[in-house]
Image (cartoon, rainbow, N blue to C red):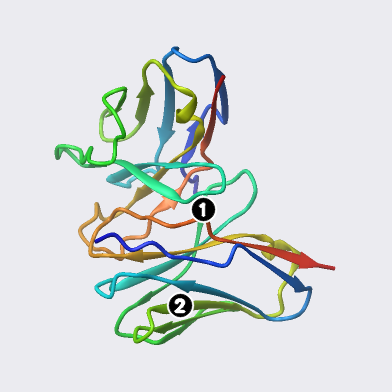
Amino acid sequence: GESVGLHLPTLSVQEGDNSIINCAYSNSASDYFIWYKQESGKGPQFIIDIRSNMDKRQGQRVTVLLNKTVKHLSLQIAATQPGDSAVYFCAPVDNDYKLSFGAGTTVTVRA
Amino acid sequence: GAGVSQSPSNKVTEKGKDVELRCDPISGHTALYWYRQSLGQGLEFLIYFQGNSAPDKSGLPSDRFSAERTGGSVSTLTIQRTQQEDSAVYLCASSLFAGGAITDTQYFGPGTRLTVL
């Protein structure tokens, strides 16, 4: 069935610190995962993705970790900047093109 | 290049009126998706177009909702006899490989915020 990423609703982080955003999913058959960032008044923006045969993937200032055993993902943002303030969603993909994600985590960066 | 564009950015309407929302996908993208995002909630799939294939309408919440895609490019989502529960942000996305790979990245437009009074 459809797997929706579940997040803690808010995260406050000091500028320059590292951020860790966590996401739990329910369907063990999910084999592809995407992180999106959504700034106020804008559509979701692709950040990074990871396949289920990997447990870590790195991008520019971001790292995604996948633990299939406990059905958990995390997105780590290094040296968080004010422009990182947004809502972050993880989208587990269940061999289907239909994206589905929950309410996400609102990240607020403190100066 | 240009991203996905949507119009209008905001639409306020009265209950019972019809509305049309427009989406211009990224040039060359063969797949187009409509989603709905309610305040503080997640993303809800509505409809999917790919090339000349019959659209996947499985996410449309009622027969008041319909969508067209003309010439394999621009799409219009129509909501008839709008209700207050239709208030949401309607997002359009497009992708290059028509859903053939689940890793086909969907690029979203800015959305249309619909408010039904």
Specify whether B58 is left or right of B106.
left
Mark nearer the N terminus (2 vs 1): 1
In the rendered view, tell whether residue B66 sits above or below residue A104: above
Specify whether A109 is left or right of B80.
right
Looking at the picture, how far across and down is residue A51, in whole percent? 33, 77
Camera-nearest residue between A68 and B31: A68
- Name, please, the residue furthest toward the left: B53
Q: Label 1, on which residue?
A: A44
Which residue is painted at 27% across and 45% down in the image?
A: B30
Label 1 sits on a secondary structure element that is: loop
Is label 2 or label 1 in front? 2
Which residue is painted at 29% across and 84% down in the image?
A: A53
In the rendered view, tell whether residue A111 sits above or below residue B24: below
Looking at the picture, how far across and down is residue A18, in whole percent? 69, 81
Residue B91 figure quarter: top left
Report the chain holding disc 1: A
The residue type indicated by label 2 comes to Leu
In the rendered view, tell whether residue A10 sits above or below residue A59: above
Q: Label 2, on which residue?
A: A73
Specify whether A86 is left or right of B65.
right
Label 2 sits on a secondary structure element that is: strand
The residue type indicated by label 1 comes to Pro
Report the chain holding disc 2: A
